[in-house]
Amino acid sequence: MANSAALTAITLADDLTLTRMGYGAMQLAGPGVFGPPKDRGQAVAVLRAVVEAGITHIDTSDFYGPAVVNELIREALHPYPADLRIVTKVGARRDAAGGWIPAQEPAALKAQVHDNLRHLGLDTLDVVNLRTPSMEGGSTASIAEQFGALAELREQGLIRHLGLSGVSGVQLTEAQGIAPVVTVQNLYNLANRADDALLDRCAAENIAYAAFFPLGGFNSLQSHTLTDVAKRLDAAPQQVALAWLLQRSSSTVLIPGTSSPAHLRENIAAAALVLPADAVAELDAIGGR
């Protein structure tokens, strides 16, 4: 495994510190994030390797599987290490064919929180993100009712901290009027920079910004540039894309997922990759920064 000393952390509250290189558990489920994994033993081994490498930040949800991934996390890691923080999300459910169905009603959100608690074997969830139906994060639709339902569970002690996923700056402001927000999880990468302003705002307000799909939405020219930079640095394109995100902002946290031990090692090694200024400038130009 990579040297855990390279895994810098961000402190968001007295009881919430996350390694900036986290682990996204979504890919541990079967094809389409549905059903059991092909190799359950390997899935358990990957989760244990995550913790052994010094990562204290695992991202999950009970709608991965559904329930499959959370049950794997419990099998592999319970009783959990004292410094491990599990970040989950609510706001959707799965149909019998594996389709993704929005589930935003307050009662449904509260039921999902209880499902996460039960399948993870926890009395309190470290962080719960409200996942909106907007993957792109550009909506200004009110989320007060939904976020308010989660805030009620926070007051009851079932949730320690709250976050958001797929949101706009307007929605972040609305949520902050209800309860503190410690994480934002949105689409952002070298090729998709629509969230530049929100990312900078999160840094200013000490909110962890979890950028997902680090290689999503690249065109052929952008991919060629990334590959060229990676070759010069003797690194994999995925590692360079992850390293760029870590250097982009002090608030960025990453949740790359894999079911492969070798791929996990590659991802973790990206935390120690320092991009020189000329490489950063070349990569910035991909998205027009």
Image (spheres, rainbow, N blue to C red):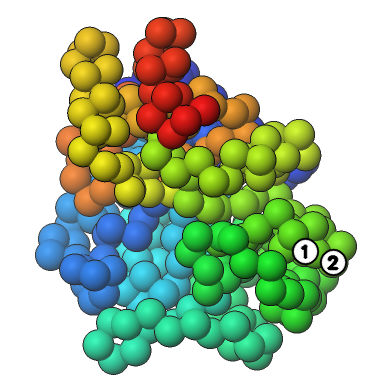
Q: Position of residue 30 (x, y in %)?
A: 20, 68
Helix, strand or loop at mark 2 = loop
Q: Residues within 10 Å of mark 2 (few under 14, many from 20)?
A: some
Judging by the rendered image, the residue that carries numbered circle 2 is 178
Q: Image height check: is 98 above or below 72? A: below
Q: How dense is the environment of label 1, judged by Cα within 10 Å: few (below 14), some, or many (20 and up)? A: many
Q: Which residue: 50% across, 60% down? A: 136
In the image, residue 196 above or below residue 94: above
Q: Amino acid at mark 2?
A: Ile
The amino acid sitting under disc 1 is: Ala
State if disc 2 and disc 1 touch (CB < 8 Å).
Answer: yes
Front in this rendered view, residue 117 or 105: 105
From the viewer's side, name the closer residue of 61 and 212. 212
Q: Is residue 268 visible?
A: no
Name above or below for residue 133 compared with residue 135: below
Task: State the residue position of label 1.
Answer: 175
Q: Is residue 115 left or right of residue 39?
A: right
Say which residue appears at 27% left-offset and 38% top-offset. 264
For residue 198, side relative to residue 186 (left or right): right
Q: Is residue 64 visible?
A: yes
Instruction: Locate residue 189, reporting x and y percent.
Output: 43, 40
Horizontal side of 9 relative to 223 (left or right) equals: right
The quarter of the picture where residue 117 lies is bottom right
Residue 286 falls in which quadrant of the image? top left
Q: Position of residue 257 (x, y in %)?
A: 32, 48
Q: Quadrant of residue 274?
A: top left
Decide which of 134, 101 is in the foreground and name it. Answer: 134
